[in-house]
Image: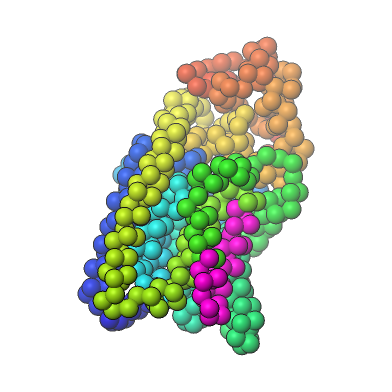
C-alpha cells in the first residue's frame, strides 16, 4: 500500500479514510476539552482573535495605536504572530469568542494529524495508534494546545519540518522556514531541529550534507527581510527575546516563562516522561546501531526537555517529541517481532488500545478540569463597556495590571492603554516610566493622579479590586473620582490635573 508523505501523491482511499477518521477523533476529543468552559483558555486569545477581526476590517497591517508607551507603539509596531492572525481571520465572522474556540480545535487537530503523517512516513507500525498517544501523554500539553495562541500551529510547522527533513525533501525547508518566521517568534527552532539532524548524520553516517541548513537558513533569512514589518521586526525580536534568554530584567513576566515544580510536571506530563524512558529502553534492547532519524528525535527530546525544565511553556513541544522518539525507537523491534499471522501481530493492537483508552480518558478529564478553572469570559466586560460609552475616543487608560490589557482590548478598542501583552515591552521602551508604573500600581505613591496624568497621559484608571494598596491611595487622592464599580473592578477619572505627557508617544 502506498505510503502517505507530505506533500504526497497517490495515497490510497484507505489511507485517506484513516486520515479522516483520525482527524475526526482529534476534533471530537479537542472539542470536548475546549468546550468544557465557555471562556477562552488564558488571556492572550482575547487579543489574538480581536486583532484578527481588526485586520479583516482595516487591512492586514492596521495602525496599532493601543500601546503607545511600549515597544509596540504605532511607529515601531511589529505583529510577531502575523500569519497566525491571518489564519484566524476566517473565524472572526460571527461571535469572536466562539470563533476563537473553534480555531483552537481545528488548528491542533491538524497538528496531531501531521504527527500521524510523520509517523507513517517513517513506516512506524500502528502509526494511527501512536498518533492517538498525543492525546494521552500530557494534560498540560492538551491545555496549551487548547489556547487560542500560535503554539499549536508552531508545532504543526515543526512536524512538517521534521517530516521533510527525515524524508530528505530538503527544498521544502525553505518555504516552511519562511512561513514560520511570519507565524511565530519561535522560528529559531527550525534551525535547531535541522542543525541537530545534519550534525547527527555527519556523526553516525560520516556524511556531511549542509543542504538542509542552507535551505532552512535561507528561508529564515528571507522571512526576516522579506517581511511586511521589516526592519521593525528585527528590533522587536531583540527587545522581546533578550530579557527571556539572558535574565536581563528582574521584571516578572507571565507564569509560562517559569518552570514547573518537579512533581507538578510528573503529575501533568507523567506519560510523556515515561514515553522518553520507554524509548531509551528500546535503544538498549535493539542490538543494531541507532539510526539518524531515531537519534534526531532522541536529541530533540532532550533539548525540548531541558527547555521545559527552564520554562513551562515548552510543554507544548516536549510531550509530542518524546512520543515521536519512543515510536521510532521501538519501530525496529516491532518490525522484527511482528511476523505475519503471529500471535503478537494479532493481539498487540488490542493490547495497545486497551492501554490507550484509560490513559486518554483520564488525561482528557484532567485537561477539562484545568480549562474549567479559566476566568469567566465576561470578566472586565462591564468596565470596558462603560469606558467605551463614556470616554472620548483615544483617551488613555492607566491599568494597575499589565495582563488586563487583552480582555480590555477584546471588549474596547475605543480607548488606548498604558501597557500590555508583556511588561518588558514598557520596560524596554522607558525603564524609568516602567518603574514608576510599578510603584503606582503597588500603592507606593501618594496622591498618584498627578503622575498618572503628567507622566502617562492617562485620563482614567482601571483596576481590579485586589489592588488594595493602590485603592487606599486612590481613595485619599482628591483628583481621582470613582465613576464605575462592579464586583471585580473599578474605574476612576482623573480630574483637576494638568497633562504634560510627551505627546510624541501618542498614536
Q: Is residue 166 left or right of residue 303?
A: left
Residue 301 covered by magenta stretch: yes
- Screen quadrant of the N terminus: bottom left
Q: Position of residue 332 (x, y in %)?
A: 45, 76
- Look at 60% across and 32% down and name the residue there: 401
- Screen quadrant of the C terminus: top right
Q: Position of residue 425 (x, y in %)?
A: 66, 45
- Look at 32% across and 45% down and name the residue there: 32
- Look at 61% across and 78% down and name the residue there: 200
Name the foreground residue: 377 vs 205.
205
Residue 109 covered by magenta stretch: no
Counting every numbered tag in the picture gives 0
Name the foreground residue: 365 vs 215.
365
- Extreme residue in the bottom direction: 207
Q: Position of residue 348 (x, y in %)?
A: 32, 65
Q: Main secondary structure of the magenta part?
A: helix
Q: Is residue 176 left or right of residue 498?
A: left
Q: Is residue 55 visible?
A: no
- Extreme residue in the front direction: 343
Q: Is residue 213 left or right of residue 239?
A: left
Seen in the picture, residue 279 relative to 341 is either above or below; the reply is: above
Seen in the picture, residue 63 relative to 350 is either above or below; the reply is: above
- Look at 62% across and 22% down and name the residue there: 467
Q: Is residue 211 visible?
A: yes
* Scheme by which the image is coloured: rainbow
Seen in the picture, residue 110 relative to 63 is either above or below; the reply is: below
Q: Position of residue 399 (x, y in %)?
A: 60, 30
- Give the residues in magenta: 281-308
Name the foreground residue: 484 vs 134.
134
Seen in the picture, residue 52 relative to 111 is either above or below; the reply is: above
Amino acid at each position: 500500500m502506498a505510503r502517505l508523505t507530505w506533500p504526497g501523491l497517490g495515497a490510497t482511499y484507505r489511507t485517506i479514510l484513516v486520515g479522516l477518521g483520525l482527524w475526526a477523533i482529534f476534533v471530537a476529543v479537542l472539542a470536548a476539552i475546549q468546550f468544557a468552559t465557555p471562556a477562552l483558555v488564558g488571556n492572550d486569545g482575547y487579543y489574538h482573535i480581536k486583532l484578527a477581526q481588526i485586520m479583516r476590517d482595516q487591512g492586514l497591517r492596521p495602525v496599532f495605536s493601543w500601546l503607545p508607551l511600549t515597544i509596540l507603539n504605532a511607529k515601531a509596531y511589529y505583529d510577531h504572530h502575523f500569519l497566525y492572525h491571518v489564519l484566524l481571520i476566517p473565524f472572526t465572522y460571527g461571535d469572536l469568542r466562539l470563533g476563537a474556540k473553534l480555531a483552537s480545535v481545528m488548528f491542533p487537530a491538524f497538528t496531531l494529524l501531521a504527527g500521524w503523517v510523520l509517523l507513517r512516513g517513517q513506516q512506524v507500525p500502528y502509526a494511527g495508534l501512536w498518533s492517538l498517544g498525543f492525546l494521552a501523554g500530557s494534560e498540560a500539553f492538551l491545555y496549551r494546545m487548547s489556547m487560542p495562541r500560535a503554539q499549536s500551529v508552531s508545532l504543526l510547522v515543526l512536524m512538517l519540518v521534521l517530516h521533510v527533513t527525515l524524508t530528505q525533501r530538503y527544498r521544502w525547508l525553505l518555504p516552511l522556514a519562511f512561513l514560520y518566521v511570519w507565524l511565530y517568534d519561535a522560528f529559531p527552532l527550525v534551525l535547531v531541529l535541522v542543525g541537530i539532524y545534519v550534525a547527527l548524520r555527519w556523526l553516525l553516517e560520516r556524511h556531511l550534507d549542509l543542504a538542509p541548513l542552507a535551505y532552512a537558513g535561507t528561508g529564515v533569512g528571507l522571512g526576516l527581510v522579506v517581511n511586511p514589518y521589516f526592519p521593525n521586526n528585527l528590533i522587536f525580536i531583540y527587545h522581546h527575546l533578550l530579557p527571556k534568554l539572558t535574565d536581563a530584567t528582574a521584571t516578572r513576566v507571565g507564569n509560562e516563562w517559569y518552570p514547573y515544580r518537579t512533581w507538578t510536571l510528573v503529575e501533568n506530563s507523567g506519560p510523556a516522561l515515561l514515553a522518553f524512558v520507554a524509548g531509551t529502553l528500546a535503544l538498549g534492547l535493539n542490538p543494531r546501531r541507532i539510526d539518524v532519524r531515531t537519534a534526531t528525535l532522541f536529541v530533540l527530546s532532550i533539548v525540548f526537555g531541558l527547555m521545559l525544565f527552564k520554562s513551562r511553556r515548552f510543554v507544548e513541544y516536549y510531550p509530542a517529541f518524546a512520543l515521536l522518539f519512543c515510536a521510532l525507537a521501538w519501530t525496529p523491534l516491532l518490525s522484527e517481532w511482528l511476523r505475519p499471522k503471529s500471535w503478537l501481530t494479532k493481539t498487540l493492537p488490542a493490547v495497545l488500545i486497551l492501554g490507550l483508552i484509560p490513559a486518554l480518558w483520564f488525561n482528557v478529564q484532567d485537561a477539562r478540569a484545568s480549562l474549567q478553572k479559566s476566568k469567566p469570559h465576561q470578566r472586565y466586560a462591564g468596565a470596558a463597556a462603560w469606558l467605551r460609552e463614556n470616554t472620548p475616543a483615544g483617551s488613555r487608560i492607566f491599568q494597575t495590571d499589565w495582563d488586563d490589557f487583552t480582555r480590555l482590548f477584546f471588549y474596547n478598542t475605543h480607548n488606548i492603554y498604558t501597557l500590555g501583552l508583556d511588561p518588558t515591552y514598557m520596560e524596554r521602551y522607558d525603564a524609568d516610566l516602567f518603574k514608576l508604573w510599578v510603584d503606582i500600581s503597588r500603592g507606593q505613591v501618594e496622591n498618584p493622579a498627578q503622575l498618572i496624568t503628567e507622566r502617562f497621559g492617562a485620563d482614567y484608571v482601571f483596576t481590579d479590586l485586589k489592588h488594595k494598596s493602590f485603592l487606599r491611595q486612590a481613595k485619599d487622592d482628591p483628583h481621582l473620582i470613582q465613576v464605575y464599580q462592579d464586583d471585580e473592578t473599578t474605574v476612576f477619572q482623573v480630574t483637576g490635573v494638568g497633562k504634560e505627557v510627551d505627546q510624541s508617544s501618542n498614536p
